[in-house]
Image (cartoon, grey):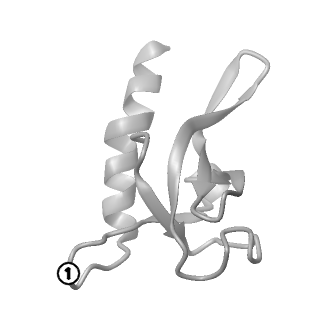
Amino acid sequence: MQLGLRVVRGPSWKWGEQDGGEGHVGSVVKPGMQISDVVLNDTVFIRWDSGQLANYCVGSDGAYDLYQFDSSAGGSYRLSDFMSFLTKSLLVPFLQLG
């Protein structure tokens, strides 16, 4: 997933007001959560505009905590577009390392 990508809470959101409340926006600041020497490709770190930093699922066990934020006129939150972007930008490069 591209650093700087803007996101909002998604269909699996269960983190209360951690994002500052429904409709608030954050940015991807770091892909994956690292456990020992392994980076989990299905998580990302988000810095919410409120300042909060946290790690969220983007496909881990079928959970999608985030939607890509579309700020264009008449924009919407599209999970399919988000997953396509995620696959091309984050998962594929990490899978190619293996």
Question: Position of 71 compared to 44: left or right?
Answer: left
Question: Position of 14 compared to 74: left or right?
Answer: right
* Residue at the spot 64% in from the left edge and 26% down from the top edge: 39
Q: Position of residue 14 (x, y in %)?
A: 74, 73
Question: Position of 78 compared to 40: left or right?
Answer: left
Circle 1 residue? 73
Q: Position of residue 21 (x, y in %)?
A: 65, 80
Q: Residue furthest left?
A: 73
Please state which amino acid type lies under the numbered disc 1.
Answer: Ala
Between 91 and 19, the one nearer to me in the picture: 19
* Residue at the spot 42% in from the left edge and 46% down from the top edge: 4
* Residue at the spot 74% in from the left edge and 76% down from the top edge: 17
Question: Is 51 located above or below residue 69 in the figure?
Answer: above
Question: Position of 37 compared to 47: left or right?
Answer: right
Q: Which quarter shows the N terminus? A: top left
The image quadrant that residue 18 belongs to is bottom right
The image quadrant that residue 31 belongs to is top right
Q: Residues within 10 Å of mark 1 (few under 14, many from 20)?
A: few
Question: Is 66 located above or below residue 83 in the figure?
Answer: below
Q: Position of residue 82 (x, y in %)?
A: 37, 59
Between 21 and 34, the one nearer to me in the picture: 21
Question: Is 7 located above or below residue 60 in the figure?
Answer: below
Task: Count all numbered tags in the image, as a single digit.
Answer: 1
Q: Position of residue 51 (x, y in %)?
A: 67, 57
* Residue at the spot 31% in from the left edge and 39% down from the top edge: 88
What secondary structure is marked by label 1? loop
